Amino acid sequence: DAKTTQPNSMESNEEEPVHLPCNHSTISGTDYIHWYRQLPSQGPEYVIHGLTSNVNNRMASLAIAEDRKSSTLILHRATLRDAAVYYCILRMAPGTGNQFYFGTGTSLTVIP
Amino acid sequence: DTGVSQNPRHKITKRGQNVTFRCDPISEHNRLYWYRQTLGQGPEFLTYFQNEAQLEKSRLLSDRFSAERPKGSFSTLEIQRTEQGDSAMYLCASSSRQGPNTEAFFGQGTRLTVV
């Protein structure tokens, strides 16, 4: 399974932007980069995904490096409700598996 | 609520007993996943269904575990002769399409405690 590397934890002040990094140096050309987050005592929640181009949605932005070996999830203004574990996941091309491989993620603490 | 629904939310059972969990996916989602999550770890894949067919099983799914999706709608996960090591959060997810350009939607999970 393709591997991602994330910092174990990060802190951010409320209402400031947060940049959550992810390294995926073994990514293949057809792997999509997905981000999920998990609030305490809840199931994972989809945040955003992309292939090559940067992506924006109402929750966050995803910045993908030109060589695709790393990506950054950007929360534009952190709120207390954004405190969660954030998982960066590679989804592989069809035929190589259907499941999501979660690592241990980055635990984000938002400081009021 | 049209999200993924899991029941029960919590289950406490004695070692050696059998337990069954239910997952109702989002309507018309033909792909369904089961995951297990222990404290401090990310979710680990257990099994995957496309409609009623169980297409993938992890080696984590020992012979005490069985999952079904009889009519391609809801799914059940049964654990026989539970052990203390089975204590975990069991998560269900569903998606509408196959392939890496697809997001999955997770339920709230069933937390199992084996005493």
Image (spheres, coloured by chain):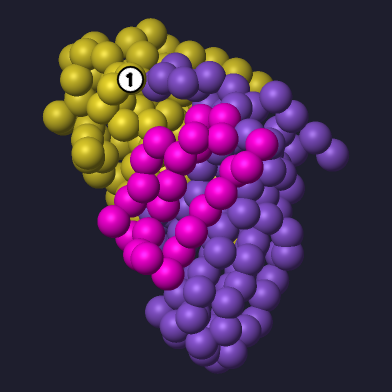
Residue range highlighted in magenta = B45-71
Q: Is residue B47 left or right of residue A45?
A: left
Drawing shade for chain B: purple
> Is B16 or A111 nearer to us in this picture?
B16
Quadrant in which the N terminus of chain B appears: top right
| Residue type beneath disc 1 | Pro
Q: Quadrant of residue B44?
A: bottom left
* Image position, residue B36 (x, y; %): 46, 59
Q: Nearer the viewer, residue B28 or A26?
A: B28
Within the image, what quadrant is residue B71 found in? top right
Q: Residue at x 46, y 40 (%)?
A: B54
Report the number of discs.
Answer: 1
Query: Is B59 one of the magenta-colored residues?
Result: yes
* Position of residue B11 in the picture relative to residue A69 (left or right): right
- Magenta stretch holds residue A10: no
Query: Measured along the vertical axis of the image, is residue A34 above or below residue A57?
Result: below
Q: Is residue A30 above or below residue A36?
A: above
Q: Which residue is mark 1?
A: A94
Instruction: Please state which of residues A47 and B98 is positioned toward the viewer in this rendering.
Output: B98
Quadrant where the C terminus of chain B sits is: bottom right
Q: Is residue B71 visible?
A: yes
Label 1: chain letter: A
Q: Residues within 10 Å of mark 1 (few under 14, many from 20)?
A: few
